[in-house]
Image: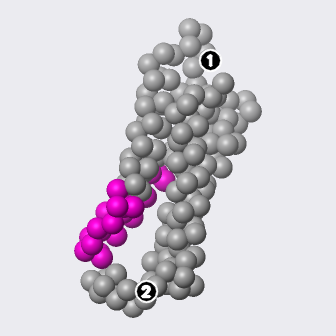
Amino acid sequence: MRSIRHKAVFGLLLFNAVSAIGGGIALMVGVIPEQPSWVRHTDFTSLYFPGVILMSLVGGSALVAAVAMLKRTAGAQLACISSGTIMIMWIVGEIASIRAFHFLQVIYLGTGALIIWWTSESTTSSRSNPPTNCSAYTDLRPTSRGRSPLLK
């Protein structure tokens, strides 16, 4: 049975993926009205390219991590931590470049941090209680079915 944190991380990844992909598309097609102050202190002339980055890098990394968790691949932990890190870096860069603050930035900063924290914590707790059969302890290497033993 999967832990509550495992399900929460999966839910946060899906939330980040859907909102970042949707937000990126909205920026690219002009659904979100362009405000000159958002690109004033950047090298971008419009919101199109930031939308591409938001959709592909931020949303794409969250989607890849969610699929990796669903398939229980060996690199799922790395994908989750990478996705959380990308989200945090995006939000910090956004705040620095637009020089403004919105309450949604706190939410997305929190989702990125929780993904990293809960993924790291589940990896640490699994390592602190290794199986009694030492040959069964495979660290992060895939099992015979190609799945990570830490995402059971």
- Indicate which disc, 1 or 2, sits on the residue closer to the N terminus: 2
Q: Read off the magenta span.
A: 82-106
- Residue drawn at (66%, 38%) of the image: 72
Q: Residue furthest right?
A: 145
Residue 5 placed where, x, y %? 52, 33
Q: What is the three-letter code of the residue carrying label 2?
A: Glu
- Residue drawn at (53%, 42%) of the image: 9
- Residue drawn at (25%, 74%) of the image: 99
In this orientation, does residue 81 appear?
A: yes
Question: Up-down: is 24 above or below 59?
Answer: below
In this orientation, does residue 62 appear?
A: no
Q: Quadrant of residue 90?
A: bottom left
In reply to whether residue 131 is colored magenta, the answer given is no
| Residue to which mark 1 is pinned | 136
| Residue to which mark 2 is pinned | 34
Q: Give whichever of 23, 129 is nearer the camera.
A: 23
Circle 2: element type: loop
Residue 108 placed where, x, y %? 41, 56
Residue 146 placed where, x, y %? 70, 36
Question: Up-down: is 71 above or below 143?
Answer: below
